[in-house]
Image (cartoon, rainbow, N blue to C red):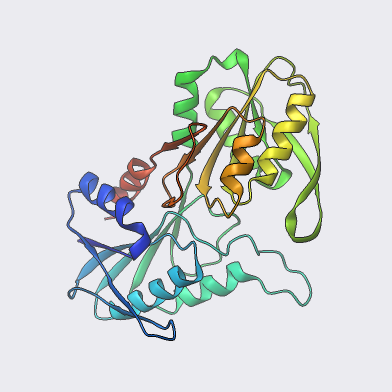
């Protein structure tokens, strides 16, 4: 067994390879003048782990072409620390369900035997056997080292992500508090209500994806208005679209903790901290090898 990764997942793959004692290779990517992508594998693999965080459209195309380049491989374990296009998962009339569409694309490759996903936004619809792991265990361990249980409150910034906060709170022996938000066009939160007493508490927001950062900003403002002492955020995936870092830096959040599921190219401020989930993935892969 060896590891091959798409271009943007090199650091994660190398760290994973070091923990598993496996050799790590990168695919070879070239672009035609029109922007079309060409992908080749450096060699033929019999059994291989493919590591890919699909943040951009190009990441997805690169992954699909890499899986086809590996069509002579006997077995592929697809490890996706972050699987993009998962948020469009509702069955609304005349609206595409991107989570289902991209799952179907992956299902096309018969030699992909298993898929490992981290904090997928909704229930994955892959036909391939899928192992869904969560960073909440890593987050709970970090939180327990930094804070006393009696001084904190575990918060979900919205109803949709409540189960993540519930899992984190359960590990810490606490009950979660849920924020409910009203959204405007394209998912922008416009108001947040807090259901629970957070006065004089250190509030810890547990979320899966930080994209624009607006959900966390609105939630932290609502919590501070309710009299909490401090607001900290833990998120599995730091997408951090344009303007998000500056927006979060100016917010009332005292710290934003992100996993290393996504490579972040922009420089982060002192308010941000990265925490690795490589050991979580390594533990999962050892169980299925």
Q: Is residue 33 left or right of residue 214?
A: left
Residue 207 lies, with reference to residue 265, above or below; the image says above
Residue 163 is situated, as x and y percent measured from the top left of the image, at 63, 41
Residue 219 lies in quadrant: top right
User: How many numbered marks are there?
Assistant: 0
**Image side of residue 117 versus residue 153, left or right:** left
User: Left or right of 191: which side holds 67?
Assistant: left
* For residue 18, above or below residue 29: above
Quarter of the image for the N terminus: give it: bottom left
- Residue shown at 35%/68% (left/top)? 113
Residue 269, position as x, y percentages in the image: 49, 36
Observer-nearest of 198 and 220? 220
Q: Is residue 214 or residue 197 the one in the foreground?
A: 214
- Residue found at x 37% / y 42%: 280
Q: Quadrant of the C terminus?
A: bottom left
Residue 75: % across, % down: 27, 70
251 or 211: nearer the viewer: 251
Q: Nearer the viewer, residue 246 or 231?
A: 246
Residue at coordinates 79% horizontally, 44% vertically from top-left?
A: 181
Which quarter of the figure has residue 197? top right
* Residue 172 placement (x, y as % from top left): 54, 24
Residue 283: quadrant of the picture = top left
- In the image, 264: left or right of 161? left
The residue drawn where x is 77% and y is 31% is: 222
């Amino acid at each position: 067994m060896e590891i091959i990764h798409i271009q943007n997942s090199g650091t994660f793959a190398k760290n994973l390879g070091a923990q598993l004692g496996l050799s790590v290779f990168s695919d070879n990517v070239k672009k035609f003048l029109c922007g079309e992508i060409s992908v080749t594998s450096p060699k033929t693999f019999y059994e291989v782990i493919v590591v890919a965080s699909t943040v951009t459209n190009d990441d997805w195309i690169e992954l699909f072409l890499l899986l086809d380049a590996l069509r002579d491989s006997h077995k592929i374990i697809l490890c996706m620390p972050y699987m993009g296009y998962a948020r469009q998962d509702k069955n609304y009339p005349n609206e595409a369900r991107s989570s289902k569409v991209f799952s179907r694309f992956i299902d096309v490759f018969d030699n992909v035997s298993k898929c490992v996903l981290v904090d997928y936004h909704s229930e994955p619809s892959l036909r391939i056997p899928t192992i869904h792991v969560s960073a909440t265990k890593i987050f709970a361990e970090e939180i327990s080292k930094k804070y006393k249980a009696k001084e904190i409150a575990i918060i979900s910034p919205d109803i949709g992500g409540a189960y993540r906060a519930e899992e984190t709170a359960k590990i810490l022996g606490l009950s979660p508090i849920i924020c409910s938000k009203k959204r405007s066009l394209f998912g922008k939160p416009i108001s947040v209500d807090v259901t629970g007493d957070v006065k004089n508490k250190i509030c810890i927001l547990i979320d899966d994806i930080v994209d624009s950062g607006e959900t966390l900003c609105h939630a932290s403002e609502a919590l501070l208005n309710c009299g909490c002492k401090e607001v900290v955020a833990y998120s599995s995936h730091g997408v951090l679209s344009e303007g998000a870092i500056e927006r979060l830096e100016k917010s009332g959040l005292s710290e934003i903790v992100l996993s290393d599921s996504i490579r972040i190219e922009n420089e982060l401020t002192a308010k941000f901290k990265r925490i690795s989930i490589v050991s979580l993935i390594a533990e999962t892969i050892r169980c299925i090898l």
